[in-house]
Image (spheres, rainbow, N blue to C red):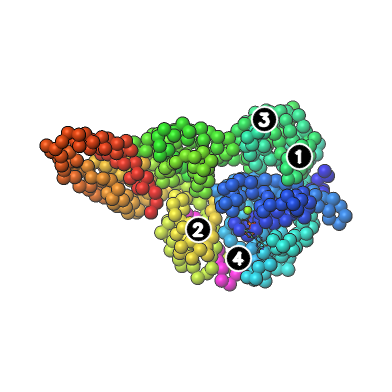
């Protein structure tokens, strides 16, 4: 196809503003999906996506569209909507020349709209502002058209109005995409350079890699090279999604499609990497490649220790389709054998946990998530800490933690509540803007560690559900962080070690000690529970000793009853873990680790 007739665009929207429904309508109107095959959210393929109404993985679909009597090709690239996948979103956006900024006409701009809009602006995309759901009685198109126009600096009259549900305005929108979005530009006779913006594992076909060809042409059966690693592969198949995979002879400048090379692991076909030919290939990769970097770590343990090999196999399988998932074996005195797993963020963690439990039938216990700390010692040695129990001992010069830039949007009556919340989470305010008379955008930098626990829940409850939040990592900062250990009868319980700000260490110690006192059964002897920073005890509780043991009751009683009791006691011990001399039922650890 002549690049002048191609338009590559994406839709950015806050969750539930109607992105998938609009995509469905476009598929229908352009005729790539027939009416009778249509089912809601055609492109959201994964079960979890459907149930949670979020898009995790992006897809690209090619649609024909006639405008002014000329046949055009529209490539719609569906970006993952969630903050955890910021890097993938930014690569999907980099494959486009324009975007549809979709806003619910009854809700207005939300945090995810803005976060994605900023990414679109960084990628110099042409932005087409659109209000959706104008069929709703509660829609306020005038108000929110003004909001959108103010935000991107256009005339309120330029804001399109559609209903993805009824299809009203969607044809006009497709025409505007052709009119407003620039055609891709590239050098046709240069060595091929194609950017990978998605990479998906398929059980039958191996990895399917989605690319946009920037320069040159990639052809069927050619040998290609991944520029970040130098690895070469044969191109077994090349084609486009329309919406099912359709093989082609090749992809040229500006085209978007898929490649199949037979590799079995998405880490061999990385998002952001540049593909070229092996012979006379390009020498300079396209910009913007980054290795995925896990931001949040958690220990995952099977509740039943015999499921450890099954957990390992399951993680291996998931990793085939998820270049950002990393894990290594870990042993915990409290929880047994498991894995320390790295995630892009909390949603990523939840999705993986859910898949392990649902698709692989595993019962898991997860330790509290923690971020990655960089520790510089006084002797200048550096440590990367992904597990609090491995925090270095000795003379520490500085501890650095990841920080994020957060965007919060809410009705202005909640400004006070949000500022208070961010304050208690060690946030610092970067700015505030009114989007309209009664809605405001607040920008904060916050330590990621303060967000991964229950920030979102706290925000929702303080704003009666009206606030929205989005964030992206912006580097690391030094902070006064300490490690708090929990000791049972003098022995450290690794699963409860935490790295916390020194002003919060005491509260954490008191809370955990009290929680454990409730959960740990009495023993033959008194069990002190302590919270300590190094050798300094900051909180203490005691589990009192039981007065009599089970056998004393049957002193002199008949032997068979005594044996039965002993057996019963043994039975109960199976699910017990020993921490030093103390027996703790595994349930107690599970209960203590789960948040309140
Ligand atoms: P997404 O999260 O942005 O992909 O949003 P969805 O497409 O899943 O839509 C969220 C909800 O809004 C669904 O219940 C849709 O049926 C509904 N919806 C989407 N577009 C419209 C519309 O134009 N009008 C009305 N009334 N509802 C819509
Ligand atoms: Mg969706």
Earlier along the polypeptide chain: callout 2 or callout 1? 1
Look at the numbered disc 1 and give the secondary structure of its residue: strand
- Foreground disc of the pair 2, 1: 1
Query: Is 39 or 540 nearer to us in this picture?
Result: 39
- Foreground disc of the pair 4, 2: 4
Q: Is residue 586 above or below residue 31?
A: above
Q: Residues within 10 Å of mark 3 (few under 14, many from 20)?
A: some
**Residue 591 place in picture, x, y as percent:** 36, 48
Look at the numbered disc 4 and give the secondary structure of its residue: loop
Quadrant of the picture in which ligand 1 is shown: bottom right
Q: Residues within 10 Å of mark 4 (few under 14, many from 20)?
A: some
Residue at image mark 4: 107
Residue at image mark 3: 262
Tell me which segment is drawn in magenta: 436-447
Earlier along the polypeptide chain: callout 4 or callout 1? 4
Let me know if residue 442 is in the magenta part: yes
Residue at image mark 1: 246
**Residue 100 place in picture, x, y as percent:** 70, 56
- Foreground disc of the pair 4, 1: 1
Alpha carbons under labels 4 and 2: distance apart: 23 Å
């Amino acid at each position: 196809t002549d690049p002048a007739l191609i338009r590559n665009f994406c839709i950015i929207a806050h969750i539930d503003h109607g992105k998938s429904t609009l995509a469905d309508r476009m598929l229908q109107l352009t005729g790539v999906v027939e009416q009778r095959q249509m089912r809601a959210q055609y492109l959201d393929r994964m079960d979890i996506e459907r149930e949670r109404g979020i898009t995790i993985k992006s897809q690209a679909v090619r649609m024909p569209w006639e405008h002014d009597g000329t046949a055009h090709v529209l490539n719609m690239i569906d970006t993952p909507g969630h903050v955890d996948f910021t890097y993938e979103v930014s690569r999907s956006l980099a494959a486009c020349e324009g975007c549809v900024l979709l806003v619910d006409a009854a809700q207005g701009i939300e945090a995810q709209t803005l976060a994605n809009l900023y990414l679109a602006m960084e990628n110099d995309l042409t932005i087409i502002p659109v209000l959706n759901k104008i069929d709703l009685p509660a829609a306020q198109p005038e108000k929110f058209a003004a909001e959108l126009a103010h935000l991107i600096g256009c005339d309120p009259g330029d804001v399109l109005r559609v209903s993805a549900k009824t299809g009203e305005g969607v044809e006009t929108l497709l025409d505007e995409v052709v009119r407003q979005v620039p055609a891709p530009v590239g050098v046709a006779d240069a060595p091929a350079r194609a950017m990978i913006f998605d990479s998906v594992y398929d059980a039958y076909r191996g990895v399917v890699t989605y690319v946009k060809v920037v320069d040159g042409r990639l052809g069927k059966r050619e040998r290609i090279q991944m520029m970040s690693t130098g690895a070469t592969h044969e191109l077994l198949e090349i084609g486009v999604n329309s919406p099912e995979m359709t093989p082609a002879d090749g992809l040229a400048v500006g085209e978007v499609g898929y490649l199949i090379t037979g590799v079995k692991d998405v880490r061999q076909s990385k998002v952001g990497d540049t593909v070229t030919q092996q012979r006379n290939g390009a020498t300079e990769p396209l910009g913007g490649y980054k290795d995925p970097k896990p931001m949040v770590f958690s220990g995952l343990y099977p509740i039943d220790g015999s499921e450890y090999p099954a957990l390992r196999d399951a993680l291996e399988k998931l990793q085939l389709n998820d270049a950002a998932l990393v894990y290594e074996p870990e042993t915990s005195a409290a929880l047994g054998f498991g894995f320390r797993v790295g995630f892009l963020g909390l949603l990523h963690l939840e999705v993986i946990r859910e898949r392990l439990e649902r698709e692989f039938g595993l019962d898991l216990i997860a330790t509290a998530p923690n971020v990655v700390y960089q520790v510089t010692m006084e002797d200048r040695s550096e440590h990367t800490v992904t597990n609090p129990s491995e925090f270095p001992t000795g003379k520490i010069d500085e501890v650095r933690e990841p920080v994020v830039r957060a965007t919060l949007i809410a009705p202005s009556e909640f400004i006070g509540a949000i500022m208070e919340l961010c304050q208690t989470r060690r946030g610092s305010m970067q700015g505030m803007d009114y989007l309209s008379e009664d809605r405001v955008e607040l920008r904060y930098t916050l330590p990621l560690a303060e967000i991964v626990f229950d920030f979102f829940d706290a925000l929702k409850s303080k704003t009666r559900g009206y606030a929205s939040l989005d964030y992206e990592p912006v580097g690391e900062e030094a902070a006064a962080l300490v490690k708090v250990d929990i000791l049972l009868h003098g022995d450290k319980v690794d699963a409860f070690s935490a790295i916390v700000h020194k002003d919060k260490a005491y509260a954490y110690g008191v809370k955990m000690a009290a929680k454990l006192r409730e959960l740990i059964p009495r023993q033959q002897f008194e069990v002190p529970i302590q919270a300590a920073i190094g050798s300094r005890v900051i909180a203490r509780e005691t589990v009192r000793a039981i007065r009599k043991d089970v056998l004393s009751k049957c002193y002199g009683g008949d032997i068979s009853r005594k044996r039965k009791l002993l057996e019963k006691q043994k039975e109960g011990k199976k699910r017990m873990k020993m921490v030093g001399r103390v027996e703790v039922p595994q349930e107690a650890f599970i209960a203590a680790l789960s948040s309140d």
